[in-house]
Every structure is written in C-alpha cells, then in structure tokens.
Amino acid sequence: MQYRLLALDLDGTLVTSHGGITEAAKQAVWSYIDAGGVVALASGRPTRGLWPAQELRLAQKGGYLLSYNGGKIVNCKTGAAIYEKDIPQDLVPVIIRMIRDAGMEAISYQDQYVLLEHVDRLWFDREASVCRMEYKEVPDLAAYVTFPVVKLMACGAPEQILALEKQAREAIGSRVDVFRSEDFYLEFVAKGIDKAATLEVLLKHLGLTRDSLAAFGDSYNDIPMIKYAGFGVAMANSIPEVLQAADAVTKSNDEDGVAHAIYRYLLDRPDC
C-alpha cells in the first residue's frame, strides 16, 4: 500500500451537509483499515466533538484524532494523548478581549462543554450542534479560562472575521497562529500548529514518511495538509484555494466523495 496514513477532514469532507456520515463512506474507511491503512481524523473541532470516530469504530479498529486543528493528537484505542500544544497562558485573556472588542463572541472548550458568554448567539448554536457538545455560559470568559487552552475561536460575519484576522496577526502573530477555518470562524492556536505540522508528528510516531500520507479536505485549514501530503485530494465542494493545492479532485461530500477517492486512489478499486 503506497499511502499508509489517511488524514480526513470532517466538516465538508467526511461529514455531509446534513451532518452525518454515509454508509458508503464508512465502508470505504473500513476497507482501507482492513487493507492495512491507518486513519486520522483531522479537524478544528475539540476532541470531545470528534463523534465521527465512534461511528467509524476507531476505538476498536484503531486510528488517531487530530483535534483543535492539530493542537492535540489522541490514540483512539487507548484514549491517550501523544501530543498537545497549548496557547501561551498569558495570551488567553488578551485574545478573548481582542475578540470582544471587535464586536464578536469568543468560544473556548472545557471537557464536554462549549464555553461562551451569551448562549443566544447563532454562531454558538451551530458550533455546539456540529460538535454535539453542551453549552456552558460564563459571565466573563477571560476571567474564567485559567486552565490550559489548545484553541480559542472567534465567531462572526465574514467581514468582521477578515478585519480581526489582520489585526490579530499584526498584534500577536509572532506568538500564535491565526487562521480562518470557515468564512465565519477565526481560530487561534499555539505558534506552529496546523494540520500539516501535527501530521508530521504523527508520521514520525508511526515510523512513516510524508510520501505515505494521503489527505482529504475542503477548506482553508486543510490547505497545509493538502500541500504537505504525498497525495492531496480536494472535495468538489472545496474552496478554490484547496482545489488549486490538491493533486486530485473527488466528488462532493454529499456525493460520497471520500468513498470514491479511497477506492480509486488508495485501494486501486475504481469500479467501487
């Protein structure tokens, strides 16, 4: 098998626009694992929000979770974290206040909770729904978050996100990485963290090289791993930048694009 490790983005890639995983996608992933491949779910979601791992039975079959856009790696079988990198603690309240001053709301995470200051915001409803996590409202997020944080996120209109992205990179870009995962999400992680950097850590852990990595994605935060992988696949529903970076384009996430690409490019079974 040429590509021994498969990194799969979730939203817009493995997960359909209706919020589920098709049976065809599950069967394709299992066929890849049964053939000797290793699957890593690579997402901006918090670890507790990576429920697709349960549907794919990765605790039994084996695999890895790359959560927080690569800020943490978890072994699905053991539940052990093999890598984690937090935002510098002194910057956490600075980032939260920067988001607040920009007229947007900040999100953090603690155990099974999405932390926020106002539960009636559309953005939070979407985040909690997608991740299948609970809300926890706190009066002052900057004062509350005194524990280690892998990721913070701003939610707002696209024009607000673009303005804050520029401001944050100029102000604190030397100490944290700032990027859009969607047009309405701006994420903050420790410096040097992205899906490609963390996949490099996982490859070393597995004794593999980047030539043995295949990566499937659709959005801004997938570009590093699409470019880094030995073989990068863009979904048909991808943003233009991902389509340009990829080695191949598969069908959309609503047309079983993941299954199609696994069979065609990784298992050499194009008729499936």
Image: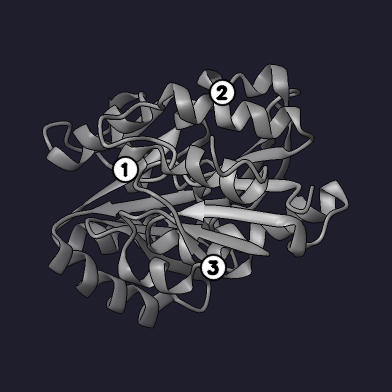
Tell me which amino acid carries mark 3.
Asp
Q: Position of residue 256 (x, y in %)?
A: 40, 37
Q: Which residue is mark 2?
A: 56
Q: Is residue 133 left or right of 30 when viewed as pictured? A: left
Give the total number of marks visible in the rendering. Answer: 3
The answer to whether residue 126 is seen in the rendering is yes
Q: Is residue 106 left or right of 62 when viewed as pictured? A: left
Q: CA distance from mark 3 to mark 2?
A: 26 Å
Q: Residues within 10 Å of mark 3 (few under 14, many from 20)?
A: some
Q: CA distance from mark 1 to mark 2?
A: 34 Å
**Viewer-nearest of discs 1 and 2:** 2
Tell me which amino acid carries mark 1.
Leu
Q: Position of residue 243 (x, y in %)?
A: 39, 67
In the picture, the disc for residue 247 is 3
Q: Residues within 10 Å of mark 2 (few under 14, many from 20)?
A: many
Q: Is residue 109 left or right of 83 when viewed as pictured? A: left
Q: Is residue 29 above or below residue 162?
A: above
**Viewer-nearest of discs 3 and 2:** 3
Secondary structure under badge 2? loop
Secondary structure under badge 1? helix
Q: Which residue is mark 1?
A: 141
Label 2 near label 1: C-beta < 8 Å?
no
Image point 63% across, 26% down: which residue?
30
**Viewer-nearest of discs 3 and 1:** 3
Q: Is residue 181 above or below residue 43?
A: below
Image point 70% across, 56% down: which residue?
213
Secondary structure under badge 3? loop
Tell me which amino acid carries mark 2.
Leu
